[in-house]
Image (cartoon, rainbow, N blue to C red):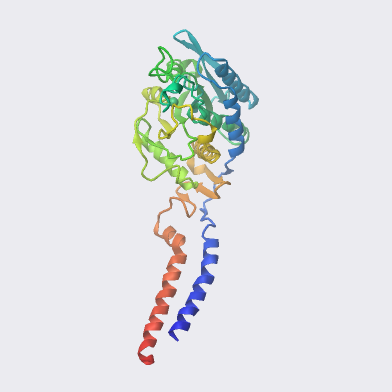
């Protein structure tokens, strides 16, 4: 009797497990109605193809044909996607440099602007390479300069559609900085973040009289195949937390750990932070190939650049139309975000969400418990 009871419950449990495992992934979607029901459009494949194009221009450090071609390539994509484009020219130690700017939604009297930025230069010297012989070689920069630039160029295609089809009263600027990565001996008499520093100095010349920058969002080194974004300490911490929460909600908890590494990084957001503009830097500095000749396509991941691209796309849209007006769907993970709510594997940590997430575990514990009670009750009569 005991054996047959155990067997019976074993059969019930094994028949339950496949069905419960099959249903827990069907998400908990907020019933709240939103004005914009939006499916994130950033494509892993498109972003990767753009990154391959950038790598074909190597070497891409200031003064090379490669960086000239890179800037022209960026400018062409911005033009093709209907942006109001401009080059911002400057020189460092006699070397001509160019930032590239694309404005979307310009000419509509928008008073607020959101900037999404990347650096497009590659470091001239791989001075962290383990092989001393290679330290004067240029960095291929698939991750450091390539990954974020590819994401922004994929975003260009999508931002054009956002501004053409949605009711947006702000401008989006995509900005690609030159001469970010040549400090500490990268190139002679270059400092770090030269391009963004010059752009921030000249910012007023790009603004209409009534305009101001609401948010500055920088992406840098986001292609690591073991990506874990830092808790970057020069960033506005509330905004960075929002970005992390969105990433976790959309199914990218691996990229946005609950306990990130905290670092303070001198990057292209600092000149904008200094101007009092709320700024964040999405970066993973923990990359073994950083400033080596191995920062190549073998050490970056299509999933990383695609995933970060979609989180950045969603974050941008939230800020353009207001959190309360949008629901975001990620077709790659199947997860959904709307204000105050997440699907069941996201950040909705209330008691009800906990029960919803683990209902099958409660069921199993209940069935096992009930079977034990039955078995124990039977025992005296069997003796
Ligand atoms: Zn770098």
- Where is residue 244 drawn, in percent x and y? 43, 41
Looking at the rendered structure, the number of numbered marks drawn on it comes to 0
The reply to whether residue 320 is visible in this rendering is: no
Q: Residue furthest right?
A: 80
Q: In what quadrant of the picture does the N terminus appear?
A: bottom left
Q: Residue at x 53, y 45 (%)?
A: 327
**Left or right: 53, with 286 as reference point:** right
- Where is residue 230 drawn, in percent x and y? 39, 37
Quarter of the picture for ligand 1? top left
360 over 375 or under it: above or below: above
The reply to whether residue 236 is visible in this rendering is: yes
Q: Residue at x 61, y 38 (%)?
A: 45
Closer to us: 104 or 220? 220
- Where is residue 257 drawn, in percent x and y? 40, 44
Q: Residue at x 54, y 71 (%)?
A: 15
Closer to us: 82 or 179? 179
Q: Residue furthest top?
A: 94
Closer to us: 175 or 180? 180
**Left or right: 34, with 227 as reference point:** right
Q: In what quadrant of the picture does the C terminus appear?
A: bottom left
Q: Residue at x 40, y 83 (%)?
A: 375
* Picture quadrant where residue 56 is located: top right
**Left or right: 365, with 48 as reference point:** left
325 over 71 or under it: above or below: below
- Where is residue 155 drawn, in percent x and y? 57, 32
197 over 19 or under it: above or below: above
């Amino acid at each position: 009797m005991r054996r047959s009871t155990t067997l019976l419950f074993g059969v019930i449990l094994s028949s339950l497990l496949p069905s419960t495992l099959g249903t827990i992934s069907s998400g908990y979607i907020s019933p709240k109605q939103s004005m914009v029901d939006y499916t994130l459009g950033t494509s892993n494949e498109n972003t990767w193809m753009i990154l391959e194009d950038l790598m074909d221009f190597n070497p891409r450090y200031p003064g090379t044909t490669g960086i000239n071609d890179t800037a022209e390539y960026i400018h062409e994509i911005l033009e093709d996607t209907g942006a109001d484009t401009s080059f911002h020219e400057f020189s460092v130690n006699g070397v001509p440099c160019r930032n590239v700017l694309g404005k979307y939604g310009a000419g509509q009297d928008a008073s607020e602007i959101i900037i999404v930025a990347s650096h497009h230069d590659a470091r001239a010297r791989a001075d962290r390479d383990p092989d001393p012989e290679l330290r004067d070689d240029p960095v291929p920069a698939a991750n450091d300069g390539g990954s974020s630039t590819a994401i922004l160029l994929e975003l260009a295609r999508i931002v054009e559609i956002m501004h053409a089809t949605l009711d947006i009263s702000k401008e989006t600027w995509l900005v690609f900085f030159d001469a970010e990565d040549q400090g500490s001996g990268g190139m002679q008499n270059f400092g770090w973040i030269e391009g963004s520093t010059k752009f921030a100095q000249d910012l007023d010349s790009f603004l209409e009289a009534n305009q101001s920058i609401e948010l500055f969002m920088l992406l840098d080194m986001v292609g690591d195949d073991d990506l874990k974004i830092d808790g970057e300490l020069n960033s506005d911490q509330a905004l960075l937390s929002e970005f992390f929460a969105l990433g976790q909600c959309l199914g990218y908890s691996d990229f946005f750990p609950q306990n990130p590494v905290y670092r303070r990084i001198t990057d292209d957001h600092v000149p904008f932070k200094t101007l009092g503009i709320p700024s964040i830097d999405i970066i993973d500095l923990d990359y073994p190939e950083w400033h080596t000749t191995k920062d190549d396509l073998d050490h970056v991941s299509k999933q990383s650049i695609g995933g970060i691209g979609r989180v950045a796309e969603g974050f941008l849209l939230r800020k353009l139309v207001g959190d309360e007006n949008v629901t975001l769907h990620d077709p790659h993970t199947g997860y959904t975000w709307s204000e105050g709510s997440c699907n069941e594997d996201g950040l909705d940590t209330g008691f009800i969400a906990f029960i919803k997430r683990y209902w099958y575990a409660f069921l199993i514990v209940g069935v096992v418990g009930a079977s034990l009670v039955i078995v124990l009750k039977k025992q005296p009569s069997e003796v």
